[in-house]
Image (tube, helix red, strand yellow):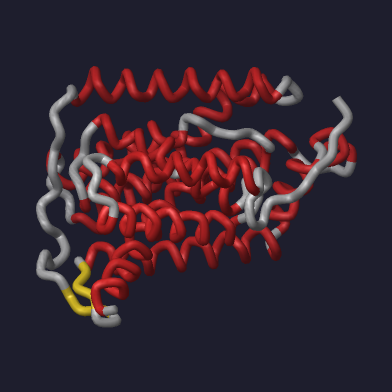
Amino acid sequence: MTAILEHLVIGIAVGAVYSIVALGFVLIYKATGIFNLAQGSLLCLGAYICYVFSITVGLPFYLAVILTLACAFVLGLLIEVLFLRRMIGQPHLAILMLTIGIYLMVRGIVLIVWGVYSKSFPPYLPTQSVTLLGASILPVFIVALVAAVILFTVFILFFKYTSIGVAMRATQDNQQVAQSVGISVKRVFGVSWAIASLTAAAGGIIVGTILSVGYSLDDFGFKVLPAIILGGLESIPGALIGGLVLGVAEHFGGAYIKLIGIEDVIPFILLLAVLLISPYGIFGLRRIERI
């Protein structure tokens, strides 16, 4: 029983990291209806930028994090202005292909600037495990869990109570109607991409401190797809729950299924199962469209 509880707690902590990464996908889709496949590369770039500020420049880690998030916010705005703005009103498939192009471009920039070798942050947090609910867990996972709860609470309130949050929801429902009532679709797109880029950088910093900083970090953008589909593409709470379920399933699978590499396979088995059983996800909106 103790072992099961320990696997559960660690799985939830790992799932909190997945939830933060998944949040960026949901924010852009909820605001614009775009499924952003460039999110993983933005996560990777955010980790590298934080590494540069912290290690290369020598700034305190907290200041490096703040500057990284600010840079990520601006980068998200630039991506929207330079690439996405002219695509407003275009078919979603064309925009999806554009996000793949952005993913490849950012990945190429990372490889050109930093190469293929991984880099490591020094241990900013204690490396000795602490006991939480009877389970031994690293402090960095506790920080990730707290950060996930804070971020999700903030964005749930943001979409529900702020004018720009309501405008984002209206734009996702119907861009033409949103424009007709005076909502600036360009502003909505810009803010949504900026915020999603910021959350990607936050996820990159956390993942980079847990593992290492390398170009392969952008794989997390694809690894969290089951969490997004499970929770529902338009649901912020769904991204949190989907990430936690993914983390728990992955950790239990790795602990009890004695197959090499099973942890990398479980997310996509889960993805196929969700698509077959409930393609709209737990909190996703069911829609019937004439085609």
**Residue 73 seen in this snapshot:** no
278 is higher (above) or lower (below) than 114? below
**Which of 177 and 285 lies nearest the eye of the viewer?**
285
**Residue 146 seen in this snapshot:** yes
Relative horizontal placement of residue 195, taking residue 17 as reference (left or right): right
Residue 117 in percent (x, y) is at 13, 28
Q: How many dots with numbers?
A: 0
Residue 188 in percent (x, y) is at 67, 41
Residue at left offset 22%, top offset 22%? 113
Residue at left offset 43%, top offset 36%? 222
**Which of 68 and 110 lies nearest the eye of the viewer?**
110
Q: Quadrant of the C terminus?
A: top right
**Which of 15 and 23 lies nearest the eye of the viewer?**
15
Q: Quadrant of the N terminus?
A: bottom left
Residue at left offset 32%, top offset 40%? 264
Relative horizontal placement of residue 250, taking residue 271 as reference (left or right): left
Residue at left offset 29%, top offset 65%? 10
Looking at the image, the residue that sits furthest to the bottom is 133
Residue 122 in percent (x, y) is at 10, 52
Residue 36 in percent (x, y) is at 54, 33
Quadrant assignment, res 179: top right
117 is higher (above) or lower (below) than 27? above
